[in-house]
Amino acid sequence: PMFTQFHIQGYQGPKGSHQQFMLADGPQCFTAPADLTLEDSGSYILTAGTAYRALFNALKISQGDRLFVEGAASGTGAWSVELGRAAGAPIVGLVSSEERRQTLADQGCASVNRKAEKIKNCFTKVPNNPAHWQHWERQGEAFLDAIREANANADTKNALCSHAVSHAGELSFARTFQALDVGGSLTYFGASSGYHMTFMGKPGDASASDMLRRAGAKPGEATVIFYGSGS
């Protein structure tokens, strides 16, 4: 499957990507590289391209950046780990089993199992009622402690993450945002658990022009401006 005109071939349709014959849009057709098999050539285009743009176009990842990756043992998450390692970024991956945790450990990466007893119930959207916000933040403390512990070998010990890749959707997005350190950056694509993204803002303030500059905003790009609750 490949992305074209906001449509993922074989994914956003009823027939799947393993059908015997498939009609493809012209922009989806490439000549296979001479040093790869047909199967190898078709295995990375959507996932690896998405991860590459997320890390290097959006986050501008470089050596030493502390990178957090959702769904880190498969698909775009696994490619984000692979490319992040190549860039020299210490990585903490969010996984769903001890087997997948071992997969990351074999690559020299730290991880957090979201199904661990102390944190398995914390992955929720931020409540609508402001009276529940502080309790929601406290529920995430064990998760933040796990992130700090995973970053124990990074240059900045026991720190949260400086960059994050989110693609698991609304149930993980808010906690991934919470796991960002001061001045951190997050990019996201897709949302397997839903598109209702919520988050609790970080301390501090900045002018609109400064924030747009820091976001690297360019003419013609869509922009979402969040003023904060009660503004």
Image (cartoon, helix red, strand yellow):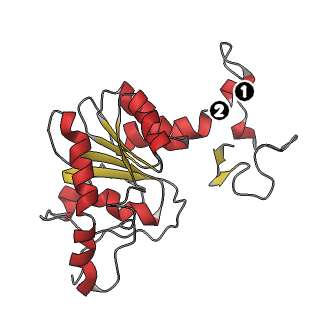
Dot 1 alpha-carbon crowd within 10 angstroms: few under 14, some 14 to 19, many 20 or more: few
Q: Residue at x 24, y 70 (%)?
A: 137
Q: Amino acid at mark 2?
A: Ser
Where in the figure is residue 159, as x and y percent of width and height?
17, 46
Left or right of 4: which side holds 65? left
The residue that mark 1 highlights is 39
Q: Is residue 115 visible?
A: yes
Where in the figure is residue 176, as x and y percent of width and height?
34, 57
Q: Is residue 52 visible?
A: no
Left or right of 28: which side holds 94? left
Query: Looking at the image, which residue sits at the far top?
Result: 35
Q: Quadrant of the C terminus?
A: bottom left
Q: Which mark is residue 145?
A: none
The residue that mark 2 highlights is 43
From this view, report whether residue 188 is shown above or below residue 127: above
Dot 2 alpha-carbon crowd within 10 angstroms: few under 14, some 14 to 19, many 20 or more: few
Q: Quadrant of the N terminus?
A: top right
Q: Residue at x 68, y 13 (%)?
A: 34
Q: Amino acid at mark 1?
A: Glu
Where in the figure is residue 145, as x and y percent of width and height?
22, 53
Query: Looking at the image, which residue sits at the far left?
Result: 204
Q: Nearer the viewer, residue 30 or 99?
A: 99
Q: Nearer the viewer, residue 104 or 228?
A: 104
- Distance from disc 1 to disc 2, alpha carbons, whole Å, reads 6 Å
Left or right of 44: which side holds 79? left
Q: Nearer the viewer, residue 101 or 83?
A: 101
Instruction: Give the quadrant of residue 24.
Output: top right
Q: Residue at x 68, y 31 (%)?
A: 42
Q: Residue at x 81, y 53 (%)?
A: 15
- Contact flag, marks 1 and 2 (Cβ < 8 Å): yes
